């Protein structure tokens, strides 16, 4: 399966969000009182229902809080922007992103590296070219998209 720059922005956003939720965490899920003051400050919106959250959800939230603590102000600003965009997505859009993330996780390391490389190339394009590319992509039928991706893959394998 080959994913290319077409979905790069959505993939990147979903990867970042999902990465915050899936990073291994050494400590077990904690009670609210066991959290540090900094963690409690970050997780304040969850305080009233903390005891009701399942341990897995608590662990994900604590991991996210720990990552947040280790971010620079610029990284935090960027993450806030991404989270705001995530919140503005419909449930259907979020589900589609989660599904693409799961598919990405199923790729081999080599395939993941190619996706990341393609995403980087896409991100390095000037904004107007990315917009044109997205507009053109959206006009293609699924069959045309598949054909285009296969042609691109063939071209790249011949160029290597």
Image (cartoon, rainbow, N blue to C red):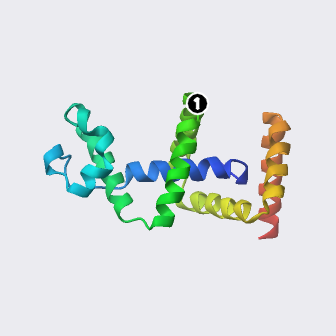
Crowding at dot 1, Cα within 10 Å, few <14 / some 14-19 / many 20+, comes out as few
In the picture, measured across the screen, residue 78 lies left or right of residue 70, that is right
* Residue at x 63%, y 57% (from the top left corner): 115
Q: Which residue is mark 1?
A: 90
* Residue at x 49%, y 63% (from the top left corner): 75
Residue with the most extreme bottom position: 160
Q: Secondary structure at mark 1?
A: loop
User: Where does the image place residue 94, in percent across and percent down from the top left?
Assistant: 55, 35
Instruction: Name the quadrant of the C terminus.
Output: bottom right
The image shows a total of numbered marks equal to 1
In the picture, measured across the screen, residue 100 lies left or right of residue 140, that is left
* Residue at x 83%, y 47% (from the top left corner): 148
User: Where does the image place residue 12, in percent across and percent down from the top left?
Assistant: 59, 53
Please state which of residues 8 and 129 is positioned toward the viewer in this rendering: 129
Residue 53 shows up from this direction? no
User: Where does the image place residue 4, in percent across and percent down from the top left?
Assistant: 70, 53
* Residue at x 26%, y 54% (from the top left corner): 39
Residue 111 shows up from this direction? yes
Query: Can you say whether 142 is above or below 40 in the image?
Result: above
Task: Answer with the quarter of the image where residue 100 lies.
Answer: top right
Query: Can you say whether 57 is above or below 120 in the image?
Result: above
In the picture, measured across the screen, residue 58 lies left or right of residue 79, that is left
Please state which of residues 92 and 41 is positioned toward the viewer in this rendering: 41
């Amino acid at each position: 399966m080959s994913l290319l720059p077409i979905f790069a922005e959505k993939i990147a956003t979903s990867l970042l969000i999902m990465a915050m939720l899936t990073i291994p965490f050494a400590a077990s899920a904690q009670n609210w009182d066991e959290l540090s003051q900094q963690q409690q400050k970050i997780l304040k919106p969850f305080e009233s229902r903390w005891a009701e959250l399942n341990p897995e959800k608590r662990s994900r939230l604590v991991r996210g809080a720990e990552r947040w603590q280790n971010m620079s102000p610029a990284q935090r600003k960027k993450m806030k922007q991404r989270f705001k965009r995530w919140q503005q997505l419909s449930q259907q859009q979020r589900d589609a992103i989660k599904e693409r993330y799961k598919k990405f996780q199923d790729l081999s390391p080599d395939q993941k590296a190619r996706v990341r490389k393609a995403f980087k190339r896409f991100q390095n394009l000037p904004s107007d070219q990315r917009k044109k590319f997205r507009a053109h992509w959206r006009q293609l039928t699924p069959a045309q998209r598949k054909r285009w991706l296969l042609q691109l893959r063939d071209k790249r394998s011949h160029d290597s």
